Amino acid sequence: AGAGLFVPKGEGEAQVRGRGDATASMLAFRVGAEWLAFPTAAVVEVIEARAVHSLPGQANPAVLGLTNIRGALKICVSLGRMLGMADADTDTDIASAKTAQRLLVVEHEQQVLVFPVNEVAGVYGYAADAVQPPPSTMAHAGMTYTQSLISWRDRQLGLLDCGLLFYALNRSLT
């Protein structure tokens, strides 16, 4: 496997401060048909997809298994299942994880998780005061883990809340 695209923590914020109104940055990516983002400060690296080894008896359907990241086994999680995406049924989601183009290595409070994604658009700056809170009336389960909506490429992109996402996964694993 080739080297990953390294996104140093905090570097995105420093780079975008000089660009107009941008005061924060995100890594935009696609899972299935949904465009989402993580704050760049949480992204350790973006790497080529690699084998994910299943965990027998795993109760959480979002946990796909373990993958080797620089010699350490890390938990690989399906965002499609975690966010309750309509097209994240078992067969499609497993096939999607196996055909993922990239893996996002994300860290929150010294815990690292890996998320297979279909496409990575890149790092983008945005004005932190221009984000919109997700509508409270939205029934989509993924909104639970969305901290804000950001206008990006003529669409609304969901910026994921790493704290809530990691907390929910940790609760389901214990």
Image (cartoon, grey):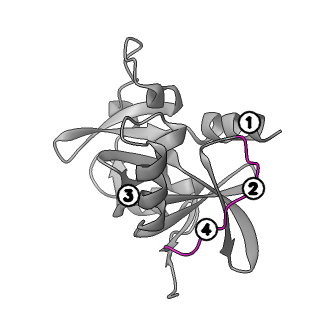
Q: Amino acid at mark 3?
A: Val
Query: Is residue 90 inside the magenta stretch?
Result: no
Q: Report which residue position mark 4 lands on.
A: 52
Which-is-in-front pick, marks 4 and 3?
A: 4
Q: Report which residue position mark 3 lands on.
A: 16
Left or right: where 174 falls relative to 125 = right
Q: Amino acid at mark 2?
A: Pro
Q: Which mark is residue 158?
A: none
Residue sitting at the far top = 137
Label 1 – label 2 distance at C-alpha: 16 Å
Q: Earlier in the sequence, mark 1 or mark 3?
A: 3
What residue is shown at x 53% (from left), y 50% (from top)? Answer: 78
The residue tagged with tag 3: helix, strand or loop? helix
Which-is-in-front pick, marks 2 and 4?
A: 2
Q: Is residue 111 above or below residue 143?
A: below
Label 2 – label 4 distance at C-alpha: 13 Å
Q: Report which residue position mark 2 lands on.
A: 56
Q: Report which residue position mark 1 lands on.
A: 172
In the rendered image, the quadrant that contains the C terminus is: top right
